[in-house]
Image (cartoon, rainbow, N blue to C red):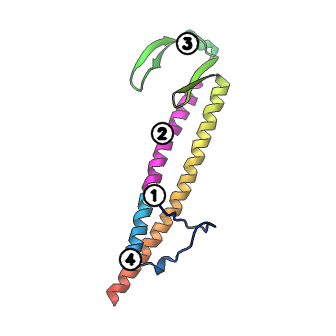
Amino acid sequence: MAQISATEQPHMKQIDLKQLNIPQLSQLKQQLDQELNLFQESLASLKVAQTKFQTSSETLQNFSPDSEGSEILVPLTGSMYVPGKLVDTNNVIIDIGTRYYVEKDIPAAKDYFQRKIEFVTEQMEKIQYLGLEKSKIRDAIVEIVEMKLAQQQQS
C-alpha cells in the first residue's frame, strides 16, 4: 500500500492532487479513510493499555507495610476473584506481557508502570499527529473533487 503524507519525504514522490481525475481522487480518499479507521482502532487499543497501566500504578499506591495481613480479592480473570491475604507488601508480581511475570519491589513496579504509561502516551501522540495530517489531505481531496464536479457541471 502506498503511503500518503502532507510533508515531503525523501523516499516519496510528490503528486499534484489537481492533476488526478475524479476516480483516482476517490480511490485516494478511500485509502485515506481506511488509514484513518486503522489509526482510530490503534488509538482505542492504546487507550485501553494506557488505562490498564494507570490502574495498576494507582493500585500500587494502596500498598504499604501497614496493609500486610489484610484480606483482599485476587483477580484470576477479568470477572473471577478469590479471597487472599497480603503476605509481602514490599514486593509484587507484575505482568510484563505475553504471559511473562516478574517480581519487583514497589518503587521498581511504580517506575515500570510510569515508563509504560509514558511510552503508550508518546505512541498515541504520534498516531494523533499522523491522523491529523492524513485528515488534512483527505479534506483537500474532497475539496478538489467538489471543485472538479462543479467544473464538469458548468461545461
Name the residue rendered at 59%, 20% in the picture.
92
**CA gap, disc 2 and disc 3:** 28 Å
Quarter placement of the C terminus: bottom left
Q: Is residue 4 visible?
A: yes
Which numbered disc flags the more N-terminal residue, 3 or 4? 4
Which residue in the structure is indicated by mark 2? Answer: 48
Which residue in the structure is indicated by mark 4? Answer: 22
Residue 16's spot in the image, x, y percent? 52, 77
Residue 86: quadrant of the picture? top right
What's the amino acid at mark 2?
Val
Which numbered disc flags the more N-terminal residue, 4 or 2? 4
Q: Nearer the viewer, residue 18 or 100?
A: 100
In magenta segment, residue 117: no
Per the rendered image, the range of residues in magenta is 35-63
Q: Which mark is residue 84?
A: none
Mark closer to the observer (4, 2): 4
Which numbered disc flags the more N-terminal residue, 3 or 1? 1
Which residue in the structure is indicated by mark 1? Answer: 35
